[in-house]
Each structure stands twice: as structure tokens, then as C-alpha cells.
């Protein structure tokens, strides 16, 4: 969640600096918003409320988390904005897909609408895990998922286990994102 904000912000900071953009808090905030855009779009595409439980990955099972979203936005903006800014938007949105494939979620349908296969990075002793079917993914979630993952990861319950490390990563991401905005507002 917070890591998406930081990833988008970092894309705009590092590459924006390399491309000669004026780095301002508004510019970085726009990068953070681009990094979080797939989750915002997912709310509208899902059509109903999203519950934060072990089935939370369902919010990723639509076009908002497909590799074709940043491509579509890139092509849509191609004639209207600077190519370098367009590239920053593309990469900030694409960073979201990478983080959702790697994080505590259960993968994304990376090539939707052309394929329903779910891809997950660094899972089950594989670099890229491809769930053969929705049924296979659901059985993994039923076995390993937990309904209180959000509380365990973000609020460090006593039985958080490995989720506490994801929570630490997320809180540090939020702190760094805020720090960057504050730092660039002071200089």
C-alpha cells in the first residue's frame, strides 16, 4: 500500500532528475499518485466494496493490475504530453504491478484480458510462480492466508510472524515518501 506511493515517487524523483524535470513536491506527489493509480482504478472497476481479509487479492483481478494498463495510458497520452513525462507515468504505474506480484498478495492477472493466469514473484521456491488455475490459487490462500493479515502486518500483533517485516517495509516506505515531499518543499 504505502510502498506504491514511494515507488511512484522514486520513479519521478530519479528519472525526473535524469530527464531534467524541475523536482517539486507537486511533481513528486503526482508520481506517488501514479504509483497508487491501479488500486484507485480497481475500486471503480470492482463495482463493489473490497474487504480486507485473506481474499483481498480479488481487487487485483481486473484490468487495473494488468500490464496493459500502463501501456494503454502511455498510448493514450502519447500525443498530448512530453514523451519523458509519459515514460515516467508509465514506469510509476508499472511499478505497482511489480510490487503486487512480489508483496504479501497472491499475485496478479498480469496479462488480463488476454489471459487469466495469475503470476507471483518469489513464491513456493520459484522466481516466478504461475498458478495454473484460480482453483490452485484459492487452495494456496485457504491453506496459507489469514484473515487478519492487515492487522498483523501494519499494526504488529504479537503473532505477526513474517508479516511484521512486510509491515516494517510499508511503514518505512510511508515515512520516506513523506520525507521526500517535505525535503523538496524546503529546498
Image (cartoon, rainbow, N blue to C red):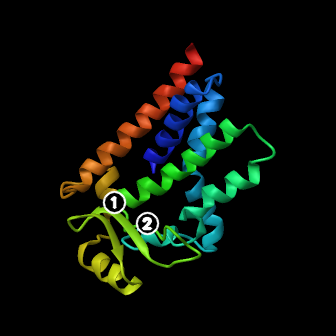
Q: What residue is rendered at 59% in x and 39% in y?
A: 31
Residue 20, image x and y in percent?
63, 23
The circle drawn on residue 104 is: 1
* Residue 157 in view (yes/no): yes
Residue 77, image x and y in percent?
75, 49
Q: Nearer the viewer, residue 116 or 181?
A: 116
Residue 120, image x and y in percent?
36, 65
Q: Nearer the viewer, residue 72 or 134?
A: 72
Q: What residue is rendered at 25% in x and 48% in y?
A: 165
The residue carrying mark 2 is 52
Locate residue 176: give its quadrant. Answer: top left
Q: Is residue 74 left or right of residue 144?
A: right
Locate residue 54: give its quadrant. Answer: bottom left
User: Could you say whether the residue bearing mark 2 is in a helix, strand or loop?
Assistant: loop
Alpha carbons under labels 1 and 2: distance apart: 13 Å
Mark 2 surroundings within 10 Å by alpha-carbon count, few (fewer than 14), some (14 through 19), many (20 or more) = some
The circle drawn on residue 74 is: none
* Residue 156 in view (yes/no): no
Q: What residue is rendered at 65% in x and 25% in y?
A: 21
Q: Is residue 176 left or right of residue 139?
A: right
Amino acid at each position: 500500500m504505502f510502498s506504491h506511493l514511494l515507488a511512484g515517487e522514486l520513479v519521478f524523483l530519479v528519472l525526473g532528475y535524469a530527464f531534467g524535470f524541475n523536482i517539486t513536491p507537486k511533481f513528486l506527489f503526482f508520481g506517488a499518485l501514479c504509483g497508487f493509480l491501479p488500486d484507485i482504478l480497481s475500486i471503480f472497476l470492482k463495482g463493489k466494496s473490497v474487504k480486507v481479509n485473506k481474499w483481498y487479492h480479488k481487487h487485483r483481478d481486473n484490468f487495473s493490475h494488468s500490464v496493459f494498463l500502463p501501456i494503454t495510458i502511455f498510448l493514450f497520452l502519447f500525443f498530448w504530453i512530453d514523451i519523458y513525462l509519459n515514460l515516467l507515468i508509465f514506469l510509476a504505474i508499472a511499478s505497482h504491478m511489480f510490487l503486487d506480484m512480489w508483496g504479501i498478495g497472491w499475485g496478479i492477472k498480469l496479462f488480463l484480458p488476454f489471459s487469466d493466469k495469475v503470476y507471483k514473484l518469489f513464491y513456493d521456491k520459484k522466481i516466478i510462480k504461475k498458478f495454473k488455475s484460480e482453483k490452485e490459487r484459492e487452495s494456496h490462500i485457504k491453506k496459507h492466508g489469514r484473515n487478519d493479515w492487515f492487522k498483523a502486518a501494519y499494526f504488529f500483533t504479537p503473532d505477526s510472524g513474517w508479516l511484521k517485516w512486510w509491515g516494517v517495509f510499508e511503514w518505512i516506505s510511508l515515512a520516506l515518501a513523506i520525507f521526500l515531499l517535505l525535503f523538496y518543499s524546503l529546498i
